[in-house]
Amino acid sequence: MNRNDTLYDLAQRYFADRGGYVVVQKLNRVSNPRRMPVGKVLKIPRSLLRREPIEAVVQNYKGSVLVGTRSAAIGLKVHEGDLVETGDRSFVSLRLPDNTTVSLPSGTRVRVQMLRRTLLAESVERQFVIQKGQAAGIVTPMTDPQSTFQFLTPRAMTSVRGTQFRVSYEPGDESSHVEVTEGKVAFREDRETEQFVEAGFGTSDQLPAPVPLLAAPDLVTPDKVQDEERLAFAVKPLTGAIRYRFQLARDAGFLDVIDEAFADTPQAELPSLPNGTYFVRMAGIDANGLEGKPSVYSFERRLNRLRTSLEQSRAGRYRQFLFRWQAPDLTGAHFRFQLSHNADGSSPVVDQTGLAGSSFVITDLPGGTYYWRVMSIEAASGRIYTKWSPTSELRVGNTK
């Protein structure tokens, strides 16, 4: 107790019912509720304490996201009772006061069922109902044993105390799934025995016990600069995977997701992005519908639509070959031209570097079969970016 505190003051500030001071007075054998010794420790039943709403905020979003009837905006407050919906290729991350985050991918509908804090005890209750789609949580460890965090679906409930996990629900087949990547969760199907799911395992309302998640896939050519119009990623095939998920984000924690794709094969293409550094997260999906352990890689996006063409003409009795190229996405780049008898460019008969223009002329080539290509060389952001054009074939004279 602080100086000048009374049971009446405490009841007014912290109790759901001011009359609750009588219970505390009897429990602690306080003779005068209007006069309390400084430093006295009181036992107060938690049931007497008042609960008040807390708020989440929109941390990041992309595309069409609704919070109730409001369009999402960074910093928008999310209240108990709000329905959060994401459209096609749309994503949102919510941040709670303790820095717990809830991330929703596209095609998801989640109702914020409960966001409450118990005064004085400082315990919090957080409950989200997944009506459709998936929700991922990164839950800050709770120090108060009465604090709760739950994802509910129409068929199951998942409770955690501090972990990273995903819960999904599909109304079409009425199935619930949970996958845990860190910590552990309690998964309870309606009227069924509770399952404890540890990191690296997943389960569903169709499984009697948790099963190991698929391993994290390895990205093929992880150092590749994404310089084509569309982004292309491929992973090494995973045993047991019937589908794959690819997600793109601006941050390694994938709180700012910007696109995703599902594929039946271990490769996928996604639409263009502005130049910059991004992250790709990939996972396999097994026959139970469980999404496996994710792998995350950073990648450089540097669009370079390098295209080539060839024109032939005569200057007197000499034949001229005009090799052209275009690199509309580059500024201040230099180029390297190669001509070889070999399709792999080895042992070139012409290897010209330091070209600042967009063409190169060769006069009177001897008969034969040639292969030519152009490399762009660009310095940007402290790095050197290079790219070869596709190799083109050129036949001169009478060749077989």
Image (cartoon, grey):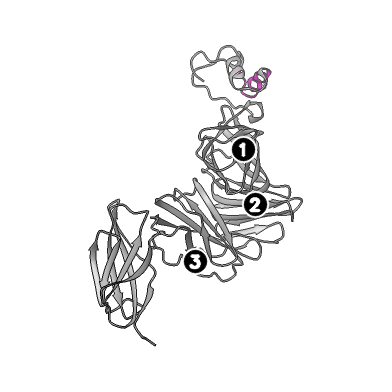
Give how far apart the Cα atoms at labels 3 and 2 are: 24 Å
- Amino acid type, mark 3: Val
Q: Residue 235 carries which label?
A: 3
Q: Residues within 10 Å of mark 3 (few under 14, many from 20)?
A: many
Give how far apart the Cα atoms at labels 1 and 3 are: 34 Å
- The numbered mark, 1 or 3, whose residue comes first in the sequence reads 1
Is 91 situated left or right of 169 in this image?
left
Query: Is residue 294 at all visible to an observer of this figure?
Result: no
Of residues 165 and 283, the one drawn nearer to the viewer in this rendering: 283
> What range is drawn magenta here?
19-30
- In this picture, is 211 found above or below 178? below
- The numbered mark, 2 or 1, whose residue comes first in the sequence reads 1
- In this picture, is 207 found above or below 154? below
Give how far apart the Cα atoms at labels 2 and 1 are: 19 Å
- In this picture, is 116 found above or below 25? below
- The residue identified by callout 2 is 168
- The numbered mark, 3 or 2, whose residue comes first in the sequence reads 2
- In this picture, is 4 found above or below 167? above
- The residue identified by callout 1 is 66
Position of residue 296 measured from the top left corner of the image (x, y, whole percent):
46, 57
- Amino acid type, mark 2: Ser
Position of residue 38 measured from the top left corner of the image (x, y, whole percent):
49, 18
Of residues 2 and 104, the one drawn nearer to the viewer in this rendering: 104
Q: Residues within 10 Å of mark 2 (few under 14, many from 20)?
A: many
Position of residue 373 measured from the top left corner of the image (x, y, whole percent):
34, 70
The quadrant in which residue 298 appears is bottom left
Residue occupying the point 54% across, 49% down: 163
Q: What element carries label 1?
A: strand
Q: Residue farthest to the front?
A: 316
